[in-house]
């Protein structure tokens, strides 16, 4: 789950659970908490949910009393809403019930974080305190993106995936952004022209917004258990090794870039210019 999926999820959650009171919470994987389970339960039971927002790959669930519930789905999770009396998914680790008997379950694929922090200590929270900018924020102009890049060394893909620079982009959406901007993932930031930076900025915002409009990735579920519609037909070169580049017809390659893989068109995205 990357920025589009978390954005879709947080908007739907806000609609269904904001303003409701937490009646009960069950956590079968208490390792995801930042405190003992009984303390966690005591702290949030009876609290009203004030708002749900997302930043990067995190949900920020604001509770009355200036507490914030932070959730990160790790490698992926199904966060599914249920109405009163509705059948629950077969497997889940977390269940939060509201005072109207609606609520949601969370099925985590690998690991997750569910941390409760005081609003005034949010800046000290190690995992979210240093999250970078929201790349689709209306108040994040191209000039600001340029400034961020010009301050950093290293290669462009590493920069884009570092959550301290830009929050919410992972190894799925980065693929087509680099392709659209005709950038090899290992291009040095210092070698990028203003034109290339502008192309990347545009590709980043277009792709993320397109996916949000389509409900996120086709293999991730939203709050109502529906899959998104952003899939293979929308991807240009991502996850299509051996297929033809939609621009020039060259075979798409999968290459190793540090600890991640990248799909590139070797002709459209040359390393040396
Ligand atoms: Zn090409």
Image (cartoon, rainbow, N blue to C red):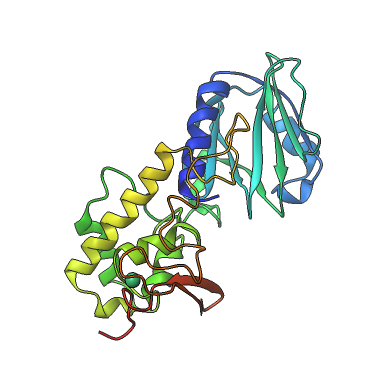
Res 165 visible: no
Choose between 200 and 125: the one closer to the eye: 200
Residue 261 position within the rendered picture, expressed as x and y whole percent measured from the top left: 53, 72
226 shown above or below 116: above
Res 179 visible: yes
247 shown above or below 208: below
Choose between 206 and 2: the one closer to the eye: 206
Residue 233 position within the rendered picture, expressed as x and y whole percent measured from the top left: 45, 50
Tell how many labels: 0
Q: With 9 as the anchor, is 187 left or right in this view? A: left
Residue 32 position within the rendered picture, expressed as x and y whole percent measured from the top left: 72, 49
Give me the residue at 25% from left, 71% from top.
150
Choose between 65 and 49: the one closer to the eye: 49
Location of the C terminus by quadrant is bottom left
Q: Quadrant of residue 116?
A: top right
* Residue furthest bottom in the image: 272
Give me the residue at 38% from left, 77% from top.
155
Residue 215 position within the rendered picture, expressed as x and y whole percent measured from the top left: 48, 37
125 shown above or below 273: above
Give me the residue at 50% from left, 64% from top.
240
Q: Quadrant of residue 22?
A: top right
Task: Please tell me in which quarter of the rendered image ligand 1 is found.
Answer: bottom left
């Amino acid at each position: 789950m990357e920025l589009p999926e978390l954005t879709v999820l947080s908007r739907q959650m806000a609609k269904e659970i904001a303003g409701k009171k937490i009646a009960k919470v069950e956590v079968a994987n208490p390792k995801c908490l930042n405190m003992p389970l009984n303390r966690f339960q005591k702290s949030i039971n009876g609290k009203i949910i004030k708002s749900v927002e997302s930043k990067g790959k995190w949900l920020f669930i604001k509770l009355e009393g200036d507490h914030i519930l932070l959730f990160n789905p790790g490698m992926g999770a199904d966060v599914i809403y249920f109405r009163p009396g509705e059948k629950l998914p077969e497997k889940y680790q977390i269940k939060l019930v509201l005072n109207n008997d609606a609520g949601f379950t969370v099925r985590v694929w690998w690991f997750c974080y569910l941390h409760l922090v005081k609003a005034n200590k949010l800046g000290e929270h190690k995992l979210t305190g240093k999250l970078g900018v929201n790349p689709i924020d209306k108040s994040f102009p191209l000039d600001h993106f340029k400034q961020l890049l010009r301050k950093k060394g290293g290669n462009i893909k590493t920069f884009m995936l570092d959550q301290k620079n830009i929050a919410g982009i992972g190894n799925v959406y980065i693929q087509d952004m680099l392709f659209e901007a005709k950038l090899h993932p290992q291009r040095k930031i210092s070698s990028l022209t203003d034109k290339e930076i502008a192309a990347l900025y545009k590709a980043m915002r277009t792709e993320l917004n397109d996916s949000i409009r389509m409900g996120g990735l086709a293999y991730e579920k939203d709050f109502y258990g529906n899959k998104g519609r952003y899939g293979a037909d929308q991807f240009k070169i991502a996850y299509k090794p051996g297929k033809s580049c939609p621009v020039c017809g060259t075979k798409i390659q999968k290459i190793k870039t540090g600890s991640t893989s990248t799909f590139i068109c070797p002709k459209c995205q040359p390393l040396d210019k």
